[in-house]
Image (tube, helix red, strand yellow):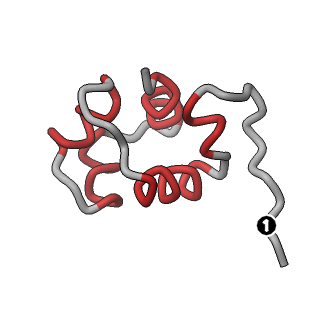
Amino acid sequence: MYKRIRDLREDKDLTQKDLSEYLSCSQVCYSSYEIGKRNIPIETLIKLSEFHNTSIDYLLGLTDEKKPYPKKK
C-alpha cells in the first residue's frame, strides 16, 4: 500500500530506524506504515512529504509527479 515511502527511504539509504526517529515513533510503528498494517496519520504524512520533498498525493500513489505543490503565500 505504501510502497513509495519504502522506496523513497531506500533511495536515500536510510533505515526504518532513521525515519522512525525523525517521526518520533518506534521502528515497529514505522514498519507497519510501510507494509500497510497501520494507517499513517495526516501529521505523519505531512512530515514524510516535507522530508522527502514531495506531495502527499505522490506518497499515496495518487500521482506519479514527485515534485511538491507550490506553497501558498
Q: For the N terminus, which image quadrant? A: top left
Q: Residue at x 45, y 30 (%)?
A: 10
Q: Position of residue 58 (x, y in %)?
A: 65, 35
Residue extending furthest toward the bottom: 73
Residue 34 screen position, x and y as percent: 34, 30
Q: Determine which quarter of the picture holds residue 63.
A: top right
Q: Residue at x 79, y 53 (%)?
A: 69
Residue occupying the point 78% across, 44% down: 67
Residue under label 1, please give it.
Answer: 71
Q: Is 48 placed above or below 4 here?
A: below
Q: Residue at 47% across / 34% down in the picture?
A: 5
Q: Is residue 53 left or right of residue 41?
A: right
Label 1 sits on a secondary structure element that is loop
**Residue 40 or 50: which is nearer the viewer?**
40
Quadrant where the image shows the C terminus: bottom right
Image location (x, y in percent) of residue 60 = 55, 32
Left or right placement of residue 34 versus residue 58 in this view: left
